[in-house]
Each structure stands twice: as C-alpha cells, then as structure tokens.
Image (cartoon, rainbow, N blue to C red):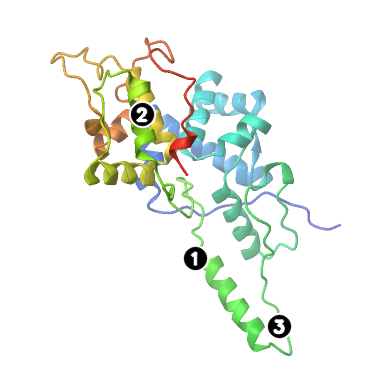
Amino acid sequence: MANTKTGLAYYNIDTDRYQDMRIKRLKKTFRCMGIAVYDYILCEIYRVRGCFIEWDESTAFDVAEYFDLKESQVSEIVSYCCAVGLFDKELLASGSILTSASIQKRYVEMCTRSKRKEIVIPEQCKIIREESPIIREESPKITEESSTLVKKSKVNIESTSVDSLSDVPPDKPQPPEKIDFEKLIFWFNDKTKGIFGKIITPLSGKRKSMIKARITEHGKDNFCLVFEKALKSDFLKGQNNRGWVATFDWMIKPSNFEKILSGNYDNKNIQSGKGVNKTLKINDIWS
C-alpha cells in the first residue's frame, strides 16, 4: 500500500522568530500564553494534516484543556492571530480552517526535502499556487535549458525560509501603488468628527511619507484600525490627568502607532463602534 502520510514528525524554526512584530503584539496582548497557544496550534497543524487544521469546538477544547484555559480565551487568541496575519482570517471565517501561505509553502518544502512522491494541499484551504516539487534524478542527458531551470528552482527552494514560531511570510505588507490622500483625510475627518483635530489637505511631504511607512509596515486594514481603536479610548480622547487629546500626527508616529494597535490604550467599557460612522467606504482611498 502506498504511503499516504500527510503529517510531519518535526519542523524547523527560525532563531529570530521573536523579532517578528506580529509575535511581539501577540505577546504584548496575551502575554506568554498567547505564544504558547500559537505554538501548540502550529505543532498540531504540522503533526496531523501537515498544512492546516480544522478549527472547531473540539479543537478549541483540546488546546484549552492542555493549558488549563477557558475555551473563550483560546478563541480570542486565535482570532487575534488571524487579525495580525499569523493565520488566514478569511479561511477561518468561511471554512473554519487555520492555515497560512507560509505554512503551506514550508510544508511543501519539508515534503520535498523528504522526497515524498505526493504533496497534496486540499482545494478548500489552498492559498499558494500549484507548483510541482523538483526532485533531482540521474539522467543520461541534461540539456543546457533544463540545467538552467533546475538551478533556478534550487535557488527558489533554498531561498524560502524554513518554518518558525513567528510564521513570517516571504514578503512584507506593501502599500498601494497610489494613495488618494484627500479621500483618506476626508475619511479620517468624517470618522473622528474633529475629536482629534481636523486635518486640512493638501498634506505635507513628511505626513505622506509617514502614512506610507505605516501602511508598508502594518498593512491598510491595520492603518485604519488604529483610528477606530483610538475612537474607543477615553484616554486618547482627553480623559487623562493632563486633559491631553491625541492628534493625527502623534498617532502615525511608529511607536505610538504600534502601542495603539497592540491595545495599550483600549477601553473595554467603551461600546464598540461608538462615535464611528460605519457607513463610510474606505476602499476608494486605495488604488
């Protein structure tokens, strides 16, 4: 009978995994337990199915039982992992599946290294493109063209980083090729209703550079999320011992941006969406 094993006995991790900003945010928000839950799920993904895991009440119970946590705590950690990009949030929402592009790429790489004949990622959870793994075989004749292709493929495989606790994707988030800054500021002014001061266009070159830098580092969704989180923070809206109110420029500075995104200024007693106009569409900002 053919070997149909899909799981892996081990997987490699990178020594700089704790330098990944997403892991830092996970640890900042959920402390060491967040790291432990994420690592446990990664091990289960590679151990059982190799490239994904079905996320349901039973799986959540297993993780919670292992660490003596509440299932609601585990679910909250998993949702946060999806929000920061450690797992694919669309597949979790649509198919109750936990995976990511980097998990799948590294699964293919590990299977290729172990010379498995069949490497299958189910269609319902496939993120990466179909690529046939290259296994070197002895051949009496190797043309110049095929030799070049083998060399290029070898470089591509070796340049792919092995799996790590941080599950770092091969590329950083990239900003849109074009940002409509006037629409962005209109969105900010309308969203915040002048609470953090009204921004007037045109923007200076420095402001544009800071906006592009934050989007490059954290992505478009997180850029908008920072201002929505600020709207839910009494402290940032002036209810502090100085009566100080955050400004747009203050919030887009690197350290302040990351603190807001990580939840340092969250108010759990503020009703979700209070003061936020949810009818606005922000997609027109990016093109």
Closer mark to the observer between disc 1 and disc 3: 1
Report the amino acid beneath label 1: Ser
Q: Residue at x 67, y 49 (%)?
A: 7
Report the amino acid beneath label 2: Phe
| Label 1 or label 2, whichever comes before in sequence order | 1
Report the amino acid beneath label 3: Glu
Name the mark on residue 186: 2
- Residue 64 in the image, given as x and y percentages of width and height: 55, 24
Q: Mark 3 and mark 2 in contact (Cβ < 8 Å)?
A: no
Relative to 148, is 105 above or below?
above
Q: Which residue is drawn at 71% across and 57% down?
A: 119
| Label 1 or label 3, whichever comes before in sequence order | 3
Q: Which residue carries the number 3 mark?
A: 138
**CA neighbours of label 2 inside 10 A, class few (<14), some (14 to 19), many (20+):** some
Residue 184 vs residue 136: left or right? left
Residue 242 vs residue 238: left or right? left
Position of the N terminus, as image quadrant, is bottom right
- Residue 284 in the image, given as x and y percentages of width and height: 47, 36
User: Disc 2 to disc 3, how far (Cα)?
Assistant: 63 Å
- Residue 139 in the image, given as x and y percentages of width and height: 73, 85
Closer mark to the observer between disc 2 and disc 3: 2
- Residue 134 in the image, given as x and y percentages of width and height: 66, 70
Q: Which residue carries the number 1 mark?
A: 159
Query: Residue 183 sits in which quadrant?
Result: top left
Q: Which residue is drawn at 69% across and 87% down?
A: 142
User: Disc 1 to disc 2, how far (Cα)?
Assistant: 43 Å
Which of 238/275 is in front? 275
Q: Residue at x 24, y 46 (%)?
A: 205
Secondary structure of the residue carrying numbered label 3: loop
Secondary structure of the residue carrying numbered label 1: helix
Residue 258 vs residue 86: left or right? left
